[in-house]
Amino acid sequence: MQTKKGIPVSPGIAIAPAMVLDGEDQPIPRRTVAPTQVPHELQRLDDALAASSAEVQELKDKTTARVGPELAAIFGFHLGMLADKSLVGEIRSAIENQRVTAEFAVYSVLKAMGKKFLQAESRYMRERVSDVWDLERRILRHLIGKARDELAHLDHNAVVIAHDLTPSQTASLDRSKIKGIATDAGGLTSHTAILAHALGIPAIVGLEDITGQVNTGDMVVIDGQRGVVTIDPDAGQLMQSRKEADRMVALGDLLGEIRDLPAETKDGTEINLQANIEFPNEIGQALNNGAKGIGLYRTEFLYLASKTEPTEEEQYQTYLEAINNLDGKPLTVRTLDLGADKMDKRHNTGNDSSERNPFLGCRSIRLCLQNLPMFKTQLRAILRASTAGPVRIMFPLISNIMELLQSKMILGDVMEDLEDQGIAYGENIPVGIMVEVPSVAIQAKTFCREVDFMSIGTNDLIQYTVAVDRGNERIASLYSGAHPAVIMLIRDVVRAADKAGVDVSLCGEMASVPEYTMLLMGLGLRSLSITPPALPEVKQIIRAVSIDQCRRVARKATTFDSDREVANYLRDQLSKAIPGVFDGRSIGY
Ligand code: PEP
Ligand code: MG
């Protein structure tokens, strides 16, 4: 039995055999398989070699047609290696004799081969090493891609162990089979973490080298409360984890009872509790958990989940489904927030790993403003759907007033086009922005003149305020919503919005973390948008406190110099307000 501690991002206990996924760009750890799995690994190898050969042959044919056979000859070298009996024999024998995974066999044999090439006398041979690496990546891509595809068709429960998962990979996991997630990389508000939480899958990120410690098939316990992974648990540990899992189900039932009660403080102040979603099918759970509407619909997941760019009609149907699912409750549609860790190479906008600084790069509204046809298509679809129910349009990552004015102008153009074409859209659609860049928080008063509403996106606001990448596990301890500078920015935005009579909400993950509920209410927020599973717990806190109490907490919290003091104080205040609230929990930041 072995345990590893990481960053807990989605509560719950998962007990299941591991399914380990390697990453093409990561060193492949030496992992063994059971003797009965050896034929399966050999078959996987054969499939990956065949797929690689077909791919290289196609490349060779295309290159020959385009630039002639001389330049295409290089692919002949790749094909030669793929058909080389002694090379393939060496990889096969590693699987058969050492019982390693196909990935490790390919990785280790081709690495050794590359090293030999590098030491060769002949310059020609030394230069061929890049072809060896190229081939290695190609075969690994097929092996790993296949393993990821297999995840969607598992016939048994499993816990996914991976270096990292992209948001679209996380979104496509089969929730009935995947019981938990543990990754080497990631931070508390990385999009994979947010999605795992929204999907209700217990998850731990930032474990650094969990992929090197676990073999596929090993029994694993994920404790998404404490952030602990147990590998090969003994009987005692298993029993304790099962008891804990039962206790959490019972707690969930208890919280379920407050679902239909108002989100109202003891002294009668109502808080507008809404939910964050990525897909319309999450709306059912959000409403069941008591949401009064959707405060953040992350529409980019529609793009991330499909292989081609969704058409206007597909988007229209999806937004319509969301509006209909809400049955008259409001829907805040955020326009595309692609880029950074929500990568999408299809749009060829440079938002892939080749962008030097993706979080400061061409993401979100910047990307939309550089891709007007894509932006306008989305706006048309939202507007058309808006005849079916109350919709608000929200622009993400605004950092400059000109961007907002330009975005509003484009929205106006799209409205005019629709009018010219005699196509209806909703009347008086409120238009707002995410406040997630410090420049906008500081200039909140100016922005209030141009918007109907604002929603504070603390996930990004924190990272840009304290210069800490929200997905980087190595600096995760520096990423904190309790940082005094972050609290001051929230306070100032709420004040500016209140003064201007602009509706203000907070939809970052901070709103879903119970430690912050009293602080946020004390800072003046009366509207929060939360990940659906966290709604009952936050409502429980709202109902247990008074606004005066929250104001006192906020006043005191703004006197501390460090995030640690603020965090300790908030935990302390919450456990005084609701004794026992932290039993078995360490989630929060
Ligand atoms: C945020 O930044 O706080 C936010 C809600 O947006 P996202 O997490 O999608 O970046
Ligand atoms: Mg954001």
Image: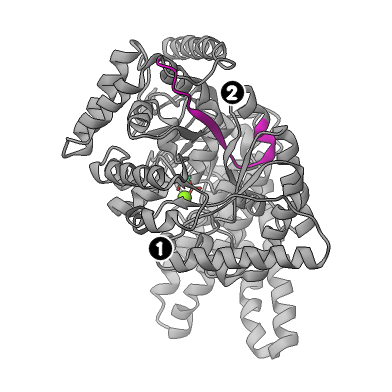
Foreground of the two, 209 or 496: 496
The answer to whether residue 134 of the structure is visible from this angle is yes
- Residue placed under numbered mark 1 in the picture: 360
Position of residue 302 measured from the top left corner of the image (x, y, whole percent): 66, 50
Disc 1 marks which amino acid?
Leu
User: Which colour assignment does the render follow?
Assistant: one colour
Q: Is residue 425 above or below residue 560?
A: below
Foreground of the two, 18 or 530: 530
Foreground of the two, 347 or 147: 347
Q: Residue at x 61, y 81 (%)?
A: 74
Position of residue 415 measured from the top left corner of the image (x, y, whole percent): 70, 62
Position of residue 417 measured from the top left corner of the image (x, y, whole percent): 75, 68
Report the magenta residues as a range: 267-283
Mark 2 neighbour density, 10 Å: few (under 14) some (14–19) many (20 or more)? many
282 part of magenta stretch: yes
- What is the distance, in whole Å, between disc 1 and disc 2 at their CAs? 36 Å
- In front: mark 1 or mark 2? 2
Position of residue 465 measured from the top left corner of the image (x, y, whole percent): 30, 52
Q: Residue at x 57, y 17 (%)?
A: 259
268 part of magenta stretch: yes
Disc 2 marks which amino acid?
Gly
Mark 1 neighbour density, 10 Å: few (under 14) some (14–19) many (20 or more)? few
| Left or right relative to 425: residue 447 | left
- Residue placed under numbered mark 2 in the picture: 290
Q: Is residue 25 above or below residue 127?
A: above
Foreground of the two, 525 or 435: 525
Image quarter in which the C terminus is found:
top left
